[in-house]
Image (cartoon, helix red, strand yellow):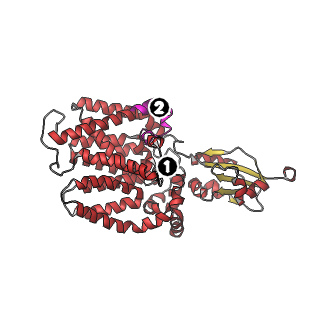
């Protein structure tokens, strides 16, 4: 409940940005229009767009972002349940609380994209995997298929699951059989997505240490939060220290049994024994392998982005929860958690700022609405930028297509390089017949510039 309250706080304040605009547009299209979009560029998000449709029908930031907020609440509950299963109720509670207060979780819990849902499904799949009955693998296979349909790169969770399965006697064959079933369900998406890769991921680059560092920046609230770097840096340092302490403590629990907050030894951790999973054995591969594998694959085919590995964060939260438990005494545990929360406050405020997202499309639309005139035209370069701005569509709907009778044109585009003015026929026509007549309004990658038709003296 705490995680839901926290993620709902200020959920409607930040403007939609261009990725969310695509989500909203796709979720409100007719099925024919949606099919054409998916066939052209966005098949990997088909399931999410379908799930979003009933929420998008209500309109507004709150309704469209609500599925992500609910997913965060579900993931938090699942993390607490996994921590309880692998260690103690206190570890589960603290791991859930750590996950809930991570600024990165609030950020993507307040976004109309699939990343929070991917994390929730990853948690559910891990919980099912940790069960005892062989019959669970049917449900596990369905969850893996669901995970891939929400985001194919989330299947990088499977090597972490392999580490768990290979330590459990007699589990390998049913696990592989469940993956084969999931593969059949995912095959159509994989085939279509492979043909859309260049359109989908043209913006990704080969990552290095700075890109890995960006994951730490995002965990502590993103670039805006780090404008005042002290508190986010302290938050990240404390989080990492708790995770490392959790690895030590979890390993110790594995060897010696559970030490309660009161200092009593209770014997082996629940569910452990020969071949049984441990908290460290589950959480470390979960937190590390998806990130490392994504970085390695990206040296050949870039697939890495911090938000693409959001589903690995629950593993980090489990380790941090174990680290808090390692403090043994309840007052010390809660005091350190309170410090972690205090370090995160400025980041949470930044995440909920009205212009926190990569684009402030709401303000851009308001400025356009105030300046446009009847008969104004619009030119999108490239054409897909129409998808990026129409979430606040009223001022854009009043604009006509560029034609012979147009005297004022609004260019909606990314930054245009010099050679493009001669290579792009539409830009070439604009440059020949119009002149820049207003200051460029910039919102992240989206720019809006007014052009007016040249008079003979301008030629």
Q: Which residue is mark 2?
A: 229
Q: Is residue 262 visible?
A: yes
Q: Position of residue 434 (x, y in %)?
A: 77, 53
Q: Which residue is mark 1?
A: 206
Q: Is residue 278 toward the left or the right of residue 226 in the image?
A: left
Q: Position of residue 198 (x, y in %)?
A: 53, 59
Q: Is residue 295 toward the left or the right of residue 243 in the image?
A: right
Looking at the rendering, which quadrant does residue 137 occupy? bottom left
Q: Position of residue 229 (x, y in %)?
A: 47, 31
CA gap, disc 1 to disc 2? 26 Å
How crowded is the residue under tag 2: few (<14 C-alpha within 10 Å), some, or many (20+)? some
Residue at the limit of the structure toward the front, as seen here:
300
Kindly identify the residue that appears in the image at 24 percent across and 55 percent down: 166
Q: Main secondary structure of the magenta part?
A: helix
Q: Secondary structure at mark 1?
A: loop
Q: Quadrant of the N terminus?
A: top left
How crowded is the residue under tag 1: few (<14 C-alpha within 10 Å), some, or many (20+)? some
Residue at the limit of the structure toward the bottom, as seen here:
32
53 to 94, vertically: above or below: below
The magenta region covers 215-234
In depth, the one of 156 and 349 nearer the eye is: 156
Residue 373: within the magenta?
Answer: no
Kindly identify the residue that appears in the image at 31 percent across and 35 percent down: 242
Kindly identify the residue that appears in the image at 87 percent across and 50 percent down: 457
The label shown at residue 218 is none
Kindly identify the residue that appears in the image at 31 percent across and 52 percent down: 160
């Amino acid at each position: 409940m705490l995680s839901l309250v926290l993620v709902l706080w200020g959920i409607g304040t930040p403007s939609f940005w261009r990725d969310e605009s695509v989500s909203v547009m796709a979720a409100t299209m007719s099925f024919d229009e949606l099919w054409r979009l998916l066939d052209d560029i966005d098949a990997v998000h088909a399931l999410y767009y379908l799930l979003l449709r009933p929420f998008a029908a209500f309109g507004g930031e709150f309704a469209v972002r609500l599925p992500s907020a609910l997913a965060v609440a579900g993931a938090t509950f699942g993390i607490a349940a996994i921590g309880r299963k692998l260690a103690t109720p206190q570890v589960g509670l603290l791991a859930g609380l750590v996950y809930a207060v991570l600024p990165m979780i609030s950020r993507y819990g307040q976004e109309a994209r699939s990343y929070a849902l991917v994390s929730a499904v990853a948690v559910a799949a891990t919980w099912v995997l940790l069960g005892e009955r062989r019959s669970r693998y049917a449900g596990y296979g369905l969850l893996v298929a669901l995970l891939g349909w929400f985001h194919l790169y989330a299947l990088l969770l499977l090597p972490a699951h392999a580490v768990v399965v290979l330590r459990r006697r007699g589990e390998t064959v049913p696990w592989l059989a469940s993956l084969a079933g999931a593969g059949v369900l995912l095959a159509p998406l994989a085939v279509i997505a492979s043909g859309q890769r260049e359109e989908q991921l043209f913006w990704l680059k080969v990552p290095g240490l700075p890109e890995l560092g960006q994951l730490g920046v995002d965990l502590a609230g993103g670039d805006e939060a780090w404008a005042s770097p002290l508190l986010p840096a302290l938050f990240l340092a404390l989080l990492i220290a708790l995770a490392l302490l959790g690895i030590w403590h979890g390993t110790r629990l594995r060897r010696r049994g559970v030490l309660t907050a009161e200092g009593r030894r209770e014997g082996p951790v629940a569910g452990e024994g020969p071949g049984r999973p441990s908290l460290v054995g589950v959480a470390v591969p979960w937190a590390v392998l998806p990130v490392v594998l994504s970085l390695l694959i990206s040296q050949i085919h870039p697939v890495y982005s911090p938000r693409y590995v959001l589903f690995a964060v629950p593993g980090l939260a489990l380790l941090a929860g174990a680290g808090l438990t390692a403090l043994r005494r309840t007052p010390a545990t809660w005091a350190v958690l309170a410090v972690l929360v205090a370090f995160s406050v400025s980041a949470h405020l930044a995440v909920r700022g009205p212009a926190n997202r990569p684009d402030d499309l709401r303000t851009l639309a308001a400025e356009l609405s105030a300046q446009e005139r009847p008969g104004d035209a619009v030119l999108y370069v490239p054409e897909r930028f129409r998808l990026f701005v129409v979430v606040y569509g009223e001022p854009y709907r009043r604009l006509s297509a560029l034609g012979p009778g147009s005297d004022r044109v609004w260019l909606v585009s990314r930054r245009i390089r010099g050679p493009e003015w001669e290579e792009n026929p539409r830009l070439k026509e604009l440059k020949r017949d119009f002149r820049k007549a207003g200051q460029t309004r910039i919102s992240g990658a989206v720019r809006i510039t007014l052009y007016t038709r040249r008079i003979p003296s301008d030629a």
